[in-house]
């Protein structure tokens, strides 16, 4: 069965964005030729689930080819459905039903690229199988929290840790059922 993974960066105090969805703190750990395992991770996925605000931000900052490249099915979770663009689908239905359907299909793994609302809804439904969290060595003090309450208690198991010269620490957890 396919698994759904969250691959995300956050500050040491648990924020994935500064106020106003500002991701500039990620530049603190940018290093030439270092992708923190992202390319290897994406080799094993063929489907992306992403919130509309995160999708819009990436389109603006990185460009449309980051997601709309025809390589993967993309599901943008939105309150307002719109027509698909290539392999990008704008989905306004039940997130749990979508993920259960995708997990039951043949294919590679599924990547949840955020945002916090989508991740927290999937957590409530106990549909996340793995977290790969890169902790950036900065305290932001305010912004968008990765984990928002209330949540049900869930056991997770640390699979491995990696440290990098930039000070970034990457934690890989498997969710236990």
Image (cartoon, rainbow, N blue to C red):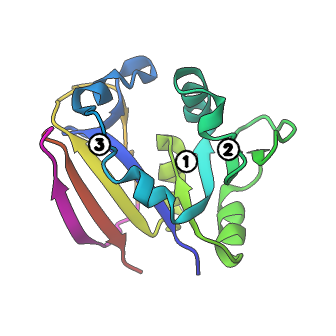
Task: State left or right for residue 12 relative to residue 172.
Answer: left
- Which residue is drawn at the image coordinates 34% and 21% (left, top)? 24
- Which residue is drawn at the image coordinates 67% and 54% (left, top)? 72
Above or below 19: residue 119: below
| Residue 90 image-quadrant placement | top right
**Residue at image mark 1:** 118
Residue 161 drawn in magenta: yes
In what element is the residue under mark 3? loop
Report the magenta residues as a range: 152-166
21 or 172, nearer to the observer: 172
Q: Residue 103, how many percent across, how many down?
A: 64, 72
The earlier-in-sequence mark between 2 and 3 is 3
Q: Residue 41, how many percent across, how many down?
A: 43, 59
Instruction: Kindly identify which numbered label has been placed on residue 59.
Output: none
Query: Nearer the viewer's eye, disc 2 or disc 3?
Result: 3
Q: Residue furthest right?
A: 83
**Residue at image mark 2:** 77
Task: State left or right for residue 162 relative to residue 42.
Answer: left
Q: Residue 126, how many percent across, how many down?
A: 49, 68
The earlier-in-sequence mark between 1 and 3 is 3
Task: State left or right for residue 80 relative to residue 2.
Answer: right
- State if disc 1 and disc 2 touch (CB < 8 Å): yes
| Residue 18 image-quadrant placement | top left
The answer for how far apart the CA atoms under marks 1 and 3 are is 27 Å
Does the rendering let one see residue 49? yes
């Amino acid at each position: 069965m396919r698994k759904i993974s969250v691959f995300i960066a956050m500050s040491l105090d648990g924020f994935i964005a500064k106020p106003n969805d500002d991701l500039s703190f990620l530049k603190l750990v940018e290093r030439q030729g270092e992708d923190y395992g992202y390319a290897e991770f994406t080799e094993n996925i063929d489907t992306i689930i992403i919130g509309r605000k995160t999708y819009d931000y990436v389109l603006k900052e990185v460009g449309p080819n980051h997601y709309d490249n025809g390589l993967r099915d993309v599901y943008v979770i939105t309150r307002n459905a719109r027509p698909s663009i290539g392999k990008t689908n704008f989905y306004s239905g039940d997130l749990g039903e979508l993920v259960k359907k995708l997990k039951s299909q043949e294919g590679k793994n599924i990547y949840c690229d955020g945002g916090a609302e989508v991740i927290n809804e999937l957590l409530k439904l106990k549909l996340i199988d793995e977290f790969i969290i890169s902790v950036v060595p900065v305290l932001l003090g305010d912004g968008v929290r990765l984990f928002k309450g209330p949540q049900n208690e869930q056991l997770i198991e640390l699979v491995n840790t990696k440290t990098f010269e930039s000070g970034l620490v990457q934690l890989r957890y498997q969710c236990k059922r």
